[in-house]
Image (spheres, rainbow, N blue to C red):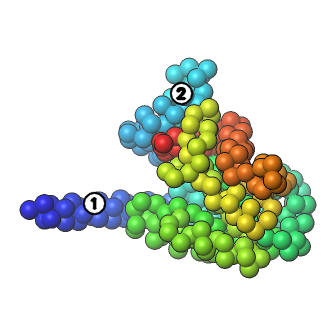
């Protein structure tokens, strides 16, 4: 009896995931018929309308209250709704990445949709034989970063967390394979794959703002959380440089991609990279980014769950 119920529950969950995926793909297909900026605005408005009806809206507001205790409820509610609009844009940007990324290094600043800060750093790293670890966060249109890196002949292997919905995950993986190098799903064996890339002189990209149950105990916005120690461990093992990178949305449908100078990771008295202190430093970098553009970070996930 129990086995039959478990099977029925699994089938019901698969059907639900399939229906959700089909609805999302249908919506994205409709948006694809519009010009990019129009499609992104529609996605923004739809997400602002749908998001507040979900349970995640309350989670987002709770996280915002604790991160910004000095702010009143009107600010919290407004930012949470704007945050849903940003999440809608993330979904829609998948189908418009080729149209959005119009970067031309010979173009004057302010022209086109894309501007890049740190071009000198990009060019210097291109000619550097040393392997590099780039890190970013779920902030703005982070999907543009590997595309931009490829423009400067900096191909990388990126670690990413697959969506829980396997039908959406399959489509996302297919879409992300088009540009910017190889992809490694965040699961068993991922660390070995990234280590192999670095050992061969390749570059690695990582998102570092996700919940990780077995991670180092750190803080983020003053609250305890667990942080994945993989990046500092790889940097310690392969003596590779670490560079922060981010992409934020600007007014009028524009984007700014920034590659920052090398981040010096804390070290132990013996000179080795201090893993826990380095995890905290990564959090501090991301927190500073989020404070600049709080509406562009994913507030509805359980980052602080220990």
Residue at the extreme left of the image, as rendered: 1
88 sits left or right of 105 in the view: left
Residue at 50% over, 66% down: 187
> Toward which corner of the image does residue 176 lie, by quadrant?
bottom right
Where residue 102 appears, x then y in whole percent?
Answer: 75, 64
Residue 262 visible in the current orientation: yes
Q: Residue 255 bears which disc, if any?
A: none
Residue at 55% over, 46% down: 226
98 above or below 247?
Answer: below
Q: Which residue is mark 2?
A: 65
Where residue 13 appears, x then y in whole percent?
Answer: 27, 60
104 above or below 47?
Answer: below
Q: Which residue is mark 1?
A: 13
267 sits left or right of 30 in the view: right
Q: CA distance from mark 1 to mark 2?
A: 33 Å
Residue at 48% over, 42% down: 306
Q: Residues within 10 Å of mark 2 (few under 14, many from 20)?
A: some
Secondary structure beneath label 2: helix
Which is nearer the eye, 215 or 67? Answer: 215
25 sits left or right of 194 in the view: left
Which is nearer the eye, 43 or 67? Answer: 67
278 sits left or right of 31 in the view: right
Residue 140 visible in the current orientation: no
The number of numbered discs placed on residues in the rendered structure image is: 2
Q: Residues within 10 Å of mark 1 (few under 14, many from 20)?
A: few
Which is nearer the eye, 281 or 40? Answer: 281
Q: Quadrant of the N terminus?
A: bottom left
Secondary structure beneath label 1: helix
Residue at 40% over, 68% down: 167
227 above or below 200?
Answer: above
Q: CB atoms at circles 1 and 2 under 8 Å apart?
A: no
Where residue 253 appears, x then y in whole percent?
Answer: 68, 50
């Amino acid at each position: 009896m129990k086995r039959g119920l478990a099977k029925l529950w699994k089938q019901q969950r698969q059907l639900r995931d399939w229906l959700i995926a089909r609805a999302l793909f249908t919506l994205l297909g409709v948006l694809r018929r519009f010009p990019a900026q129009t499609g992104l605005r529609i996605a923004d408005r739809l997400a602002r309308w749908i998001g507040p009806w979900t349970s995640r809206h309350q989670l987002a507001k709770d996280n915002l209250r604790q991160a910004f205790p000095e702010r009143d409820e009107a600010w919290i509610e407004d930012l949470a709704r704007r945050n849903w609009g940003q999440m809608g844009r993330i979904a829609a940007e998948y189908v418009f990445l080729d149209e959005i990324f119009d970067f031309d290094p010979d173009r004057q600043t302010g022209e086109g949709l894309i501007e890049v800060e740190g071009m000198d750093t990009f060019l210097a790293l291109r000619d550097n034989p040393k392997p590099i670890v780039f890190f970013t966060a779920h902030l703005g249109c982070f999907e543009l970063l590997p595309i931009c890196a490829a423009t400067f002949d900096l191909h990388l292997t990126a670690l990413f967390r697959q969506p829980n919905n396997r039908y959406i995950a399959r489509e996302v993986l297919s879409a992300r394979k088009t540009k910017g190098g190889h992809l490694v799903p965040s699961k068993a064996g991922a660390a070995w794959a990234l280590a192999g890339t670095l050992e061969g002189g390749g570059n690695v990209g990582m998102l570092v703002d996700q919940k990780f149950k077995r991670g180092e105990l750190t803080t983020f916005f003053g609250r305890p959380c667990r942080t994945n120690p993989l990046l500092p461990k790889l940097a310690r093992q392969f003596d590779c440089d670490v560079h922060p990178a981010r992409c934020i949305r600007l007014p009028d449908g524009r984007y700014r991609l920034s590659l920052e100078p090398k981040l010096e990771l804390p070290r132990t008295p013996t000179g080795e990279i201090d893993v826990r202190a380095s995890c905290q430093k990564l959090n501090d970098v991301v927190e500073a980014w989020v404070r600049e553009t709080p509406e562009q970070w994913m507030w509805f996930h359980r980052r602080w769950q220990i």
